Image (cartoon, grey):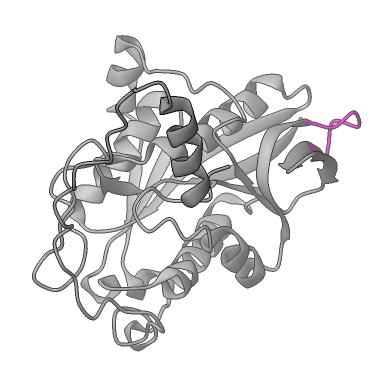
Amino acid sequence: MSHMNVVVLVKHVPDAQLRRSFSSDLTLNREESILSELDEYPIEAALALREAAQDKEISVFALTVGPEKAAAAVKKALQIGADAGFHVQDAGIAGSDALTTSKVLAAAVTKIGEEHGGVDLVLTGMTSTDGETSLVPAQLAELLDVALVTQADSLDWAEDGSSLAATRSGGSVQQSVEVAAPALVSVTDQANEPRYPNFKAIMAAKKKPVTDFSLEDLGVDAAGVGRDASTIAVVSADERPAREQGEIIRDEGDAGVKLVEFLASERLI
């Protein structure tokens, strides 16, 4: 039986149900943060591949980059079903943009591969719910020099049992593609229905290993990451303006016409 290692990227993001704000250094305030809900889909995809594998033993690793509290994202991934977690934590990473973050992630994936016999598949969500750039999957695949499939609406084993089959939707067109390891695949929120951890899984997660990495551990020069090395930076931020009252259309026999005219003026129809 062959062995396969899958790394799932997870991120600790501000709770979308709460009001967002910036800290004094113009980074997002992450005090009230949770595992990005879009990262539950790649976790589920990895677990489903593990359960459907006929001739492979699959290890699922959760990887995050962030401050101390970001460990909560890894903890949640372990509760859902990942086997082990990895947390890159270093003050030098603060303020990194998508590209410098991808460089750190690439070093971490490489390190995991060196210590665990290679990484065959990296799975990510379709985007993060804080930055919403969707840049990391492609950047990371390029840095790792692996095949890339983005925005997969489904992910399963291909008929040969060794490569992966994915579907991608774009407008009125649906693509069916196959990719062999090593590869990176980002999955959408249409790919599956994420499972929820039960009490037994939550208790079992406490015994699963979590490894911390610093930039030095990864062999990454601190001068090449962080705010000063990033090509994109937030230079100012203002509070969101108060929401104004919308236009009210009163029905005097012509409400339908007025509604259509309003939608047309807003280019919504």
Residue placed most toward the observer, 251 or 179: 251
Residue, x 54% and y 46% (percent of image)?
A: 126
Report whether residue 83 is seen.
no
Specify the quadrant that holds the C terminus.
top right
Residue placed most toward the observer, 211 or 158: 158
Residue, x 27% and y 73% (percent of image)?
A: 95
Q: Main secondary structure of the magenta part?
A: loop
| Direction top: furthest residue | 199
The residue stretch that appears in magenta: 157-165
Question: From the viewer's perspective, is residue 244 above or below residue 96?
Answer: above
Residue, x 27% and y 28% (percent of image)?
A: 206
Is 77 included in the stretch rendered in magenta? no
Question: From the viewer's perspective, is residue 4 above or below residue 250?
Answer: below
Residue placed most toward the observer, 148 or 234: 234
**95 relative to 42 in the view: left or right:** left
User: Residue 23 falls in which quadrant of the image?
Assistant: bottom left
Specify the quadrant that holds the N terminus.
top right
Report whether residue 269 is seen.
yes
Is 160 included in the stretch rendered in magenta? yes
x, y percentage for residue 52? Answer: 71, 21
Question: From the viewer's perspective, is residue 142 above or below residue 204?
Answer: below
x, y percentage for residue 96? Answer: 34, 73
| Direction front: furthest residue | 253
x, y percentage for residue 46? Answer: 59, 33
| Direction right: furthest residue | 160
Q: How many marks?
A: 0
**112 relative to 58 in the view: left or right:** left
